[in-house]
Image (cartoon, rainbow, N blue to C red):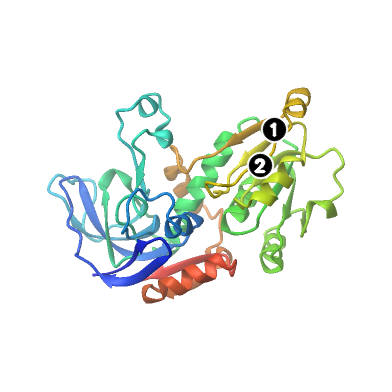
Amino acid sequence: MKAAVISAPGTVEVATVEDPTPGPREVVVSVAACGLCGTDLHILQGEFAPTLPVVPGHEFAGTVVATGSAVTELAEGDRVAVDPSLYCFECHYCRIGRNNLCERWAAIGVTTAGGAAEFAVAPVGNCVKLPDHIRTEDAALIEPLSCAVRGYDILRSQQLGTRVLIYGSGTMGLMMLELAKRTGAAGVDVVDINPQRLATARTLGCSVAAGSADELDRPRGWDVVIDATGNERAIQDALGRVGKGGTFLQFGVADYAARATIEPYRIYNQEITITGSMAVLHSYERATELFAAGVLDPEVFISDRLPLDHYAEALGRFRAGEGRKILVRP
C-alpha cells in the first residue's frame, strides 16, 4: 500500500509499505481521509515520535475491511472514526483514570503507523461507528474535536456568563470557539495574525476578532484565556491577559524548547489558575455525538482535500498557516 513516511527529521515521502494485518482484537481500516495537525509538524522536526521512520496521521476515519479473529463488535463494511490513543491500563495514571498521562503513552500515527496511508490498523476498542448521515471523510474532524472537548473538561470552573479570549483561529481555536459558545460564555474574542483565519472566526460568530489583544477593550482582562497556537510569543502575551480569578489554558502544542515567564505574586494575589490539556481523555465518544448533532460544519472547517501523493505539499501548506483543516485522501 501507499503511505506517507517520515523517515528522519525534516524528511517525508510517499512510499510503498507492507499492508497491515490485524491482531486478534484489531481491525484494518481503509482510510477515507486523514487530517493534518501540529503534532505532525512536531514529528517531522524530530519531536514526539520515539523512533523514526513512522507513518503519521492520528486524525482519520474510514471503512473496516478486515477484522481480527476475536473481533465481534465490528464487521467489514462498517464505517468508523478512530481514537488514536493507546494506553497501557496498568500504570499509576491509568489506574486512577488519567489515561492520557499514561507512563507508556502511545498513539496511532505518533508511535505506531497511522492514517496517512491507504490502510491503517487499530484496536477495535478505539473505533466508533458512524451514524449514516455523517460522511466518512468528514469524520476525520472528530479526533481534534475530542481534544477540544477534553480542553473544556479541564475548564470545569467556567461559569455562565464568562468572557473568553482565544489566541489562534486555526482548526483548534475555531473548535474552542464553537464549544465556548455552547458552554455559557457571554462573549468569545479571538486573536490571530492571519486575516483569512480571523474572517472564519467572524463567520462562526465570535464577539470580536482582532490581530492583537491590544485592539480589544477589556481593561480587567478575561475570565478564561486559551492559547490554541503553541507559539511562545502568543503564550506570553496571553498569560498577561487573564483577569483576576481567571484561568489560562495551554491548549496549543508548543515546541519542547518554548519558554514563558510567569509572575508568581500576581498568580497568588489574583488567584489565577494556569492549566493544560493533553490530547484526549474519555472525550472521543462525546465528540462523536456532538459532531453527529452538527456542532461543526465540515464545509467551514475543512479548507483543503488533497490526494495522499501530495502529503508533503499538504504539510507545507499547514506549516505556512494556509487554510484551516487540511485533509489528505488516499
Q: Which residue is mark 2?
A: 260
Task: Report x, y in % for residue 101.
Answer: 43, 34
Residue 214 as seen in the image, left or right of residue 185:
right
Q: Which residue type carries mark 1? A: Gln
Query: In the drawing, does residue 292 fall left or right of residue 264?
Result: left
Image quadrant holding the N terminus, namely bottom left
Q: Residue at x 46, y 41 (%)?
A: 283
Does 98 sit above or below residue 152?
A: above
Q: Residues within 10 Å of mark 2 (few under 14, many from 20)?
A: few
**At numbered mark 2, what does the secondary structure look like: helix, strand or loop?**
loop
The residue located at (33%, 38%) in the rendering is: 87
Residue at 36% from the left image edge and 63% from the top image edge? 6
Taking depth in this image into account, of 113 and 54 the one nearest to the observer is 54
Quarter of the image where one finds residue 8: bottom left
Percent from the top left, x then y, of residue 126?
A: 32, 46
Label 1, on which residue?
Answer: 159
Q: From where the camera sits, is residue 330 visible? A: no
Specify the quadrant that holds the C terminus. Answer: bottom left
Q: Is residue 305 left or right of residue 240?
A: left
**Helix, strand or loop status at disc 1:** loop
